[in-house]
Image (cartoon, rainbow, N blue to C red):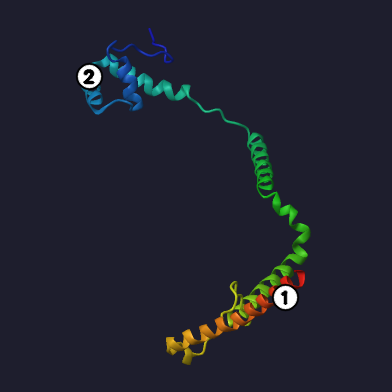
Amino acid sequence: MKERSDTLRTACKDFEEDLVLYYYGDDSEAERSRVESHLLSCASCHAFLDDLRKLLPQMVKPNELPQSFWDNYHREMVEKLACQEERKYWWRNLLVPMRAWMLPAFGTAVVAALAIGLVIGKGGWHFSLSQPREKIPQEILADTNQLEFFESLDMLESLSKLEALDGTKAEMLNSRG
């Protein structure tokens, strides 16, 4: 009686699962050496492993797709990528009408900024936020006594103005009374 080639021969019950893991290489080194030593002494497990090697590759045949499928797939992917690229840079379409005058306008702005920077940098324009100080001659600053003298002169000038104001107040009071 002939055995059918599409069925697996039986193996030891304790080693069936280990033989499948051994076939796929998913076992540890210790398990692998244990299965190999068992295979040397057990003919039914050896035959079971040979059947696995013959039948499993036939069971997992890849589905071959026709060339038209791959052509359509390629065309659709190219279209999707193009649409994605358009969505990614949508703002570029807004700048298309401005391309004719953007370069000259940008160049003019750069030249103007450079000219202003050079004028300010050379000292042509001075910006001061505080009021200018009166310049005191160096001869006066050398001697603090002289500085006090000039400050007292400023006070004397102010006194004459105060006396004049005081005199006008007195006249106003006399004219009322």
Q: Is residue 21 above or below residue 68?
A: above
Residue that appears at 65% across and 34% down: 69
Number of labels in the image equals 2
Q: Is residue 172 left or right of residue 139?
A: right
Of residues 105 and 58, the one drawn nearer to the viewer in this rendering: 105
Of all residues, the one furthest to the front in this rendering is 177
Q: Is residue 145 above or below residue 112?
A: below
Amino acid on which disc 1 is placed: Glu
Of residues 103 and 15, the one drawn nearer to the viewer in this rendering: 103
Q: Who comes first in sequence, dot 2 or dot 1?
A: 2
Q: Is residue 53 above or below residue 176?
A: above
Q: Is residue 39 left or right of residue 54?
A: left
Image disc number at residue 171:
1
Of all residues, the one furthest to the top in this rendering is 1
Amino acid on which disc 2 is placed: His
Q: Residues within 10 Å of mark 1 (few under 14, many from 20)?
A: few
The CA span between labels 2 and 1 is 137 Å
User: In which image quadrant can residue 124 be found?
Assistant: bottom right
Residue 32 at what x, y percent from top left? 25, 25
User: In which image quadrant can residue 28 be found?
Assistant: top left
Residue that appears at 65% across and 75% down: 166
C-beta proximity under 8 Å, tags 2 and 1: no
* Quadrant (top left, top right, bottom left, bottom right) of the N terminus: top left
Q: Which residue is mark 2?
A: 38
SS at mark 2 in the image: helix
Of residues 78 and 66, the one drawn nearer to the viewer in this rendering: 78
User: In which image quadrant can residue 57 be found?
Assistant: top left
SS at mark 1 in the image: helix
Residue 23 at what x, y percent from top left? 34, 24
Residue 177 at what x, y percent from top left? 75, 69
Residue 68 at what x, y percent from top left? 67, 35
